[in-house]
Image (cartoon, helix red, strand yellow):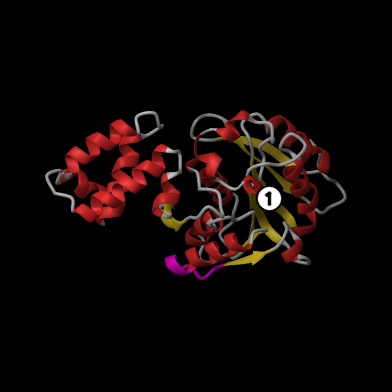
Amino acid sequence: MDFQHWLRDATRRLAEGESPKRDAEILLSFVTGKTRTFVMAFGETVLTATQLEQLDTLLARREQGEPVAYLVGEREFWSLPLSVSPATLIPRPDTECLVEQALLRLPAIPLSLLDLGTGTGAVALALASERPDCQITGVDLQPDAVKLAQHNAQKLGITNACFLHGSWFAPVQGQRFALIASNPPYIDAADPHLSQGDVRFEPMTALVAANAGLADLTYIIQNAPAHLEDGGWLLLEHGWQQSHDVQNLLRETGYREVATVQDYGGNDRISLGQWRHSGDTGRD
């Protein structure tokens, strides 16, 4: 069987998925070692028996809903090829909005930045790649996630990012940062979407939070001031219906310049605030 016919059959088998053709192309590229451009341009290329066997196994797993990123062990984020594993969330395109908003608020001087719940290291490494003059620290509760983030930094040759194991601010006690970014767990345990799509295979500890998904967001908002420099920013990714609650938490805690930014789909996704250590909290 050649590339073209395999792609046709695989796309049909994956028809119930969100992106059957793209998924099939990624799997074919992964097994053959060819770029997706090559796969499309040379559809007459014949697959070997070994390749067909590997593809059939991967296709069956994808039909069961297993994420393509886990199948091939990689996902691109901010144009960085990141290794992924079931120990972490798969980086989403909308999280790039968190990186964009962080970069917009960084002055052109060397700074220390913090990424809480770093997972694959996606946000920390994206910031580090754009600001080699800054030092970025990523923290994660899961040891396997920390090892994966460290692996990604080494693979990409990024030397201005380090990754620490621990719960939220515990590994950085006594340190202050010009900016803290986080994509924490924010889904309610009762959310029906947890039984649908790729999230069925992702770690629940990285997805679900108590108090209708607000527990970890609340903790970070209330404890970040002790770790922010004067005028430092806190940026948080959250669910599309949580912006009102997150903004209220930021204002009640005393942050200034509180605002929410939408993701690429037009949904409220990133809420942020600036912290001042002066007596005037500037609550708005």
- Left or right relative to 26: residue 166: right
Magenta span contains residue 159 = yes
Q: Toward the viewer: 251 or 264?
A: 264
Q: Position of residue 226 (x, y in %)?
A: 80, 57
Q: Toward the viewer: 284 or 85?
A: 85
Q: Position of residue 103 (x, y in %)?
A: 55, 51
Looking at the rendering, the stretch of residues picked out in magenta corresponds to 154-161
Q: Position of residue 169 (x, y in %)?
A: 74, 59
Residue 170 sits in quarter = bottom right
Q: Quadrant of the N terminus?
A: top left
Q: Toward the viewer: 121 or 222?
A: 121
Q: Residue furthest right?
A: 279
Q: Quadrant of the C terminus?
A: top right
Q: Is residue 24 above or below residue 74?
A: above
Q: Residue at x 44, y 38 (%)?
A: 64
Q: Toward the viewer: 7 or 167?
A: 7
Q: Mark 1 sits on what residue?
A: 233
Q: Position of residue 109 (x, y in %)?
A: 58, 63
**Type of amino acid at the residue the image marks with label 1:** Trp
- Left or right relative to 227: residue 191: left
Residue 14 visible in the picture? yes
Magenta span contains residue 52 = no
Q: Which structural element holds mark 1?
A: strand
Q: Residue at x 24, y 49 (%)?
A: 52
- Left or right relative to 278: residue 208: left
Q: How many marks?
A: 1
Q: Residue at x 50, y 43 (%)?
A: 92
- Left or right relative to 246: residue 56: left
Q: Is residue 195 above or below residue 69?
A: above
